[in-house]
Amino acid sequence: MKKERVRNPGTQEKRKNPGTGYIYLVKNPASNEASICAWDSVLYPGTSVVIPTRYGLDLGVIVASADQLGKAYEPGSLEFHGACHQQRFEESGEEELLYQDGPDEHPCESCRGCNPPNDPEEVPVTSDVLWIDRLATPSDLNRYQELTAKEDEAMRICREKIALHKLDMKLVTAHYLLGEPKIIFFFTADVRVDFRDLVKDLVSVFKIRIELRQIGVRDESRVLGGLAVCGRDFCCHSVTDKLNPVSIKMAKEQNLSLNSMKISGPCGRLLCCLSYEYDFYIEEKRNYPPEGSRLKVGYDLLRITEVNILSKQITLAGGEGRMVSLPQKAVFYNDATARWEITKEWADEFLSP
């Protein structure tokens, strides 16, 4: 008689991942990091799963199907897909409609945030895509809540130990891993910190593995979250965890104030949203003569002082304080003369008595 193999529930077999599957965008609630993971069946947003992270196995939440995420910006595209703009007031029980397309249509009926696309499709999965370890069970969710409740106490103990060792570091948060006995402490510091003695003290208290991770100030905002200057949640906390480089050149190209207080976020770094429309501004400015150049109008040379791509207006300054404003369609680039010129129709209108 053939004996059945009894699987030890405490260990997991390494399953053979098929070549195809369904890929999803999965977010880790603790670190707010998002990753692309695969699974062999259809899952829907809000499903709790256990995923491999760079810290170890931890809880994740399905955000969306990754094969239907927005693609890279295409030049000339005027379409955008963002978060739902509907705001619900649960306290008063009333709902405010921020826009209305028609008398009989609710805004959410045409909103992609409220009406996600069709079911995900099975696609080929490459070797660099992580696979979801398993679907989270009720015991996993209960354990996660129990560990989360212990994190405040772990923070308090760690802060006491930091003060005891007189270390120049700021503790940001603490997190118990779901898949293995380990605590991760995230901290920020301006200089390199020798925390070996601190780790020894923490191990003697918690009796499990301790890991200290130094993060930057932008990562601190990503982990903790908060309200940005626009009144919405931090982009790095609610939209994406990919912190792209932002430069002062992006603010210049968008004609924004270079006052650091106005273009910096609560983290003290330049606003992440400066990079969102940068490619669009670069593309649009190709249809305008550069600021500071001169445009011949009749017998006069007028200097371009401002280019506003939002209102599609060009402001020119002439002698004796004259200011002229003309639309973008009034100018064109002459390949034969290799310079910007004014259209004949607008020139006749401008020079007519």
Image (cartoon, rainbow, N blue to C red):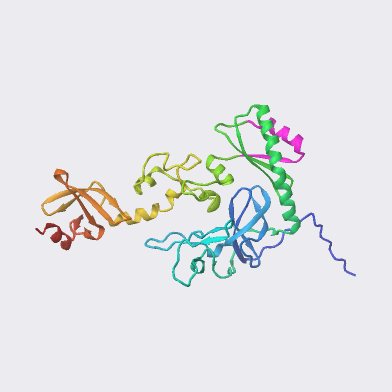
Picture coordinates of residue 260 (x, y %)? Answer: 41, 39
Q: Quick check: 219 above or below 169?
A: below
Q: Which residue is painted at 45% across and 63% down in the image?
A: 99
Q: Which residue is painted at 42% across and 39% down in the image?
A: 261
Q: Quadrant of residue 176?
A: top right
Q: Which residue is painted at 51% across and 48% down in the image?
A: 243
Q: Who is closer to the viewer here, 170 or 246?
A: 170
Left or right of 290? Residue 165 is right
Asked if one can make out residue 288 in the rendered structure from this viewpoint, the answer is no
Asked if one can make out residue 275 in the rendered structure from this viewpoint, the answer is yes
Left or right of 151? Residue 101 is left
Q: Who is closer to the viewer here, 39 or 58?
A: 58
* Residue 216 on the magenta segment: no
* Residue 212 on the magenta segment: yes
Picture coordinates of residue 212 (x, y %)? Answer: 65, 38
Left or right of 348? Residue 182 is right
Q: Which residue is painted at 63% across and 57% down in the image?
A: 61
Picture coordinates of residue 303 (x, y %)? Answer: 20, 47
* Quarter containing the N terminus: bottom right
* Farthest bottom residue in view: 104
In magenta, the rendered stretch is 194-213
Q: Who is closer to the viewer here, 231 or 320?
A: 231
* Quarter containing the C terminus: bottom left
Q: Who is closer to the viewer here, 271 or 229?
A: 229
Picture coordinates of residue 71 (x, y %)? Answer: 48, 61
Q: Quadrant of residue 328?
A: bottom left
